[in-house]
């Protein structure tokens, strides 16, 4: 099962990453200035992730 992990950037913004069951980052959020912002972002992901037309799917380059 996956999990959300919240991190603070050096500029003070918070972001969240969703980690898949294998530990890999599956989704990264934009920066949020408030706790309410990232909480709403997580709720939005939970509510809309199954609706493929509501998000842009990108693939990162392998490093």
Image: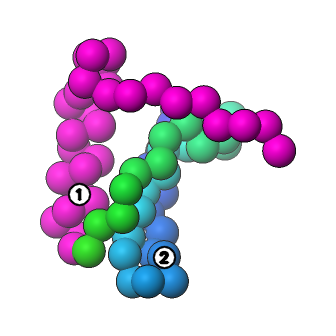
User: Along the line of sight, which residue is nearer the eye, 43 or 27?
Assistant: 27
Residue 62 pos. (x, y %): 79, 37
Q: Residue furthest bottom?
A: 11
Residue drawn at x 23%, y 57% is 39
Relative side of 52 to 28, left or right: left
Name the residue: 66% across, 42% down: 23
Per the image, the residue denoted by label 2 is 9
In the rendering, at what x and y percent does residue 48 appear?
23, 27
Q: Nearer the viewer, residue 63 or 28?
A: 63
Would you say residue 27 sits in the magenta stretch? no
Q: Is residue 36 inside the magenta stretch? A: yes
Which circle marks residue 50 in the picture? none
- Of mark 1 and mark 2, the one earlier in the sequence is 2
The quadrant the C terminus occupies is top right
Q: Position of residue 33 (x, y in %)?
A: 26, 74
Q: Residue 3: where, in percent of width, then height?
A: 48, 45
Q: Which residues are magenta?
A: 34-63
The image shows residue 56, relative to residue 53, as above or below, that is: below
Distance, label 1 to label 2, CA atoms, is: 16 Å
Q: Residue at x 29, y 37 (%)?
A: 45
Image quarter for residue 55?
A: top left
Query: What is the crowding at mark 2: few (fewer than 14 residues within 10 Å), some, or many (at least 20)?
Result: few
Q: Which residue, given by chain and number where applicable, does mark 1 sit on? A: 39
Which numbered disc, 1 or 2, marks the residue closer to the eye? Answer: 2
Task: Say whether residue 14 is left or right of residue 38.
Answer: right
**Residue 21 in sight from this viewpoint:** no
Judged from the image, the secondary structure of the residue bearing numbered disc 1 is helix
Q: Residues within 10 Å of mark 1 (few under 14, many from 20)?
A: few
The answer to whether residue 1 is above or below residue 31 is above
Question: SS class of the residue under badge 2?
Answer: loop
Query: Picture quarter containing residue 61?
Result: top right
């Amino acid at each position: 099962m996956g999990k959300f992990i919240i991190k603070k950037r050096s500029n003070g913004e918070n972001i969240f990453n969703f980690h898949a069951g294998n530990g890999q980052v599956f989704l990264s959020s934009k920066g949020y200035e408030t706790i309410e912002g990232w909480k709403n972002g997580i709720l939005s992901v939970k509510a809309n992730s199954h609706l493929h037309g509501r998000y842009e799917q990108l693939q990162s380059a392998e490093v």
